[in-house]
Amino acid sequence: MSPGRKGRKPFAARRPAKLAPLAAGANAKFATPRDNLAHMSIEPPVARQVPSKRTQHGDTVIDEYAWLADKDDPETIAYLKAENGYTDALTERLEPLRDAIFGEIKARTQESDLSVPVRKGGWWQYSRTVEGQQYPVFCRRAVREGEVIPPMAAGGLPLDGEEVLLDGNELAAGASFFSLGAFSLTAGQRKLAYSTDFSGDERFTLRVKDLSTGATLSDEIPGTYYGCAWSADGQYLFYVTVDEAWRPFRVWRHQIGTPASADVKVFEESDERFWVTVRLTRSERYLVIRTASVLTSEVLLLDAATPAGRFVTVAPRRQGVEYEVDHAGDRLLILHNDQAPDFELATAPVSDPREWTPLIPHEAGTRLLSAMAFAGFIVVYFRRDGLTGLRILSGGRPAHEHEVAFPEPLYTVGPGSNPEFEATRFRLSYASLVTPDSVYDCDMATGDLTLLKRQPVLPVPGEPPYDPGNYEQHREWATADDGTRVPISLVCRRGTPRDGTAPCLLYGYGSYEISRDPNFSISRLSLLDRGFVYALAHVRGGGEMGRAWYLDGKLLRKKNTFTDFVASARHLVRENWTSSGRLVARGGSAGGLLMGAAVNLAPEAFAGIVAHVPFVDALNTILDPSLPLTVTEWEEWGDPLHDPEVYAYMKSYTPYENIAATRYPPVFALGGLNDTRVSYHEPAKWIARLRATASGGPFLLKTEMEAGHGGRSGRYDAWREEALVLAWVVTTISDRTQ
């Protein structure tokens, strides 16, 4: 996530007329405004403190706001709505700036646009967006004789001869939320399996469309997880369902034309630490079931031509060994970390998949991320020195390899969409902090790159066109408390002063070995053109610097993530990129945990905090194995339920349990009522306790009542929400510095 010029007067100078006071009923758990928002007091809702005791490992804790976890309690919903009303009241003054930023995002975006078509068999597949519509339209067009370069149409218009496979706008008609969980064509491209979610809880209904007639078949399977896979003949569909804790754990085989009640269970994972997925190899020769915990995985294969057969294990699971499998002719590609912390690539005969022979041996400092098999080459995706890269092995041999090179000092490169196993060109994506998202084809015979498309950045009316030369990007290095050097990627408008007066938005994540790489953002331009510095702190717990970087920011080393971020903020101030009164921090999900922990450690270091779906009640959540993700997460955070050392360590950093009676900067927390990953009650409890314990603020909570972990689903709705956050960032700094 990433987050104006002529602003409104400071809020204190624009006080509304006196409004009706709060009325607190005797049985209410919070103070609720009388009448409607137009008559609402500017005072925030006050969540009543209802003591709830937690005793673990001899330690007793009182949680006054545990009642907010009851989603079925009407008072919980009423409280969330009251919080939304308060946030609306306090952000009403931002509307002109929010409208301006939304207008800038919209103006810079080519609303009717076409993705670069990718070839699969005799078809070009692509998606397009239409001005005024929220969701993509998924299409295909037959390949014409002699076509090698993908066809494109000016202005995002449909291609001549287009066939619409699925129109997200038609599916979403009348719904406030819409998301696709699966989109999979049979090998012959005669049928399409797709799944939909209309609430944001990531539970999908799977359906099948006959592309020869355009009819949706009677097959309908509710309660499925992401993804699915077809048998070779297109008569069977494999899919995954979840347990009560939202853990994907069963794989089913569905025969087209039969009721879901007749589906056959082909795999079940009994270990609650493991999640299950199903897919096809790139060759479409084998069905793949992968079951994995945070630290361990196991893969099973089945010939896609014999869907009623038995899945065979490639290598039995061993604690701490992760591996992925792809198919290449008479051998398998095995990407694994057995005695190879940064992973190595091996091969194994299909007939004897447990005999692994190194193809690319382990090299410390070069983290291999994935390997993609094609008929005539292999592409290895890797990370080195904080940057991503691609290595091409022609003929599948290291002796005939080259790396794709780019000139910018900071960038992100990765595999694009490559569904064609027999392809001779490799599709890749590229971007930097100043270069918009770009799509290239790499000719495997020559290594030549062909730029197919660069994301248009249209001019805002009355302003000049976007010019990357007007911006500059830098790599900075902060020094952590233990002496570790922490990379920071930074972008600003050229000529931004280095005297501490520039406002700054600092983003961080730092968990699950997930990297936040230098990328391009149209919405970010609305900050940069207002004089902002935008920085990414690549803190430990992420994967930016290899597997060791991740291991040094998890379990009983998790605090390194938080101290790295504070060190990054202070480095930017020390180097005069900004000042603490002009620096807002932003993060989401596990990055929201980072926001809460960092502001507890150093509230004076930040002018404001934006936390999206923040994992701020981490200890209470990880203590409850009945909740989604908890048991799986024990290998990421530790098991506080059974281990007193982990319990004490998590208690010492969990944001909700470490709020101090001191002055905090303003905080803006955003949640989703139907979020299955980070429950809505975590930010709700956090904001309630901040108000009750700390001074400063204000502390705002906005809960999307019909959305989940990803927020609003439609692109215009998402832009409106982003514009609100950016307007809040700009105004919060303006208020602090006036």
Image (cartoon, helix red, strand yellow):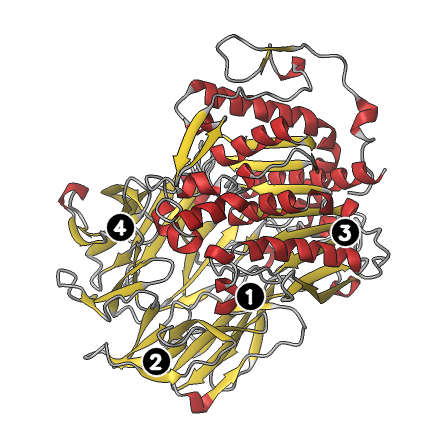
- Secondary element at tag 1: loop
Tags 2 and 3 in contact by the CB under 8 Å rule? no
Q: Which residue is mark 4?
A: 249
x and y, in percent, of residue 45 in the image: 60, 21
Q: Which residue is mark 3?
A: 532
x and y, in percent, of residue 358 in the image: 35, 84
- Kind of residue sitting beneath label 3: Phe
Residue ID at (55%, 49%): 591
Q: Which residue is mark 1?
A: 544
Tags 4 and 2 in contact by the CB under 8 Å rule? no
- Mark 1 vs mark 4: which is more N-terminal? 4
Residue most extreme to the bottom? 399
Q: Can I make out residue 433 in this image?
A: no
Query: Which of the 4 quarters of the picture holds residue 286?
Result: bottom left
- Mark 4 vs mark 2: which is more N-terminal? 4
Residues under labels 4 and 2: Cα distance? 28 Å
- Mark 3 vs mark 4: which is more N-terminal? 4
Image quadrant occupied by the C terminus: top right
- Secondary element at tag 3: loop
- Secondary element at tag 4: strand
Residues under labels 2 and 1: Cα distance? 23 Å
Residues under labels 1 and 4: Cα distance? 30 Å
- Kind of residue sitting beneath label 4: Phe
Residue ID at (37%, 62%): 295
Disc sitting over residue 346 in the figure? 2
- Mark 2 vs mark 1: which is more N-terminal? 2
Query: Which of the 4 quarters of the picture holds residue 356?
Result: bottom left
Q: Is residue 522 above or below residue 435?
A: above
- Kind of residue sitting beneath label 2: Ala
- Is disc 3 surrounded by few (<14), some (14 to 19) or many (20+) residues within 10 Å? many
- Kind of residue sitting beneath label 1: Glu
Q: Is residue 80 above or below residue 354?
A: above
